Amino acid sequence: MKLLFKQRLFSWFDSYDIYREDGGTAYTVQGQLSWGHCLKIFDPQGNEIGTVKERVLTFLPKFELYMGDRYIGCISKELSFLKPRYEIDCMGWQVEGDFMEWDYRVTDRAGRCVATVSKELFNWTDTYTIEVADPGDALAALMLVLAIDAEKCSEK
């Protein structure tokens, strides 16, 4: 399953439209007024199905992931030099790749590829392609990409 992740050009808060390969809307993401990033994810019918929420007052950025009201885990930036590294404590996933250029993959404990992410260059807004092996993992993979994107925006 391939998702196209496009940030909206004019919005006060982080807002994104996530499209399927056929061009239909898979998800919409709306930033909320809060201390730290808080991104709400909605299905095409407008039902809230997920949240990415930044924990504030931490030494390094940390984001909690929720499916509905259920906490599924956390992604946090690790202290590293030269290349950014992230620790994920949900679903047994790991993130590896080149975060500076936005090309990375998400793997499970067995080393199987769960998702690949790549940034498209030369667009007015942030645009990413997310390829997910199992469509059942699409929402969780999207939340990881949102958390990493929010961390990179905070860094600026």
Image: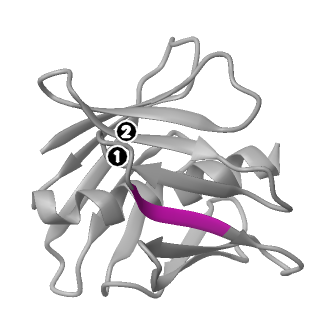
In-front residue for pair 28/110: 28
Q: Amino acid at mark 1?
A: Val
Q: Quick check: marks 2 and 1 in contact, CB under 8 Å?
A: yes
Left or right: 59, with 120 as reference point:
right
Q: Residue sitting at 38 percent across and 44 percent down?
A: 46
Q: Would you place residue 66 above or below residue 52 in this image?
A: below
- Label 1: element kind: strand
Quarter that holds the C terminus: top right
Q: Quadrant of residue 96?
A: bottom left
Q: Where residue 57 appears, x then y in whole percent?
A: 89, 79
Name the residue beneath numbered marker 2. 118
As rendered, which of 74 and 28 lies closer to the eye?
28
**Main SS of residues in magenta:** strand
Q: Which residue is label 1 attached to?
A: 117
* Magenta-colored stretch includes residue 57: no
In front here: 84 or 34?
Answer: 34
Q: Give the extent of the magenta segment.
A: 48-53
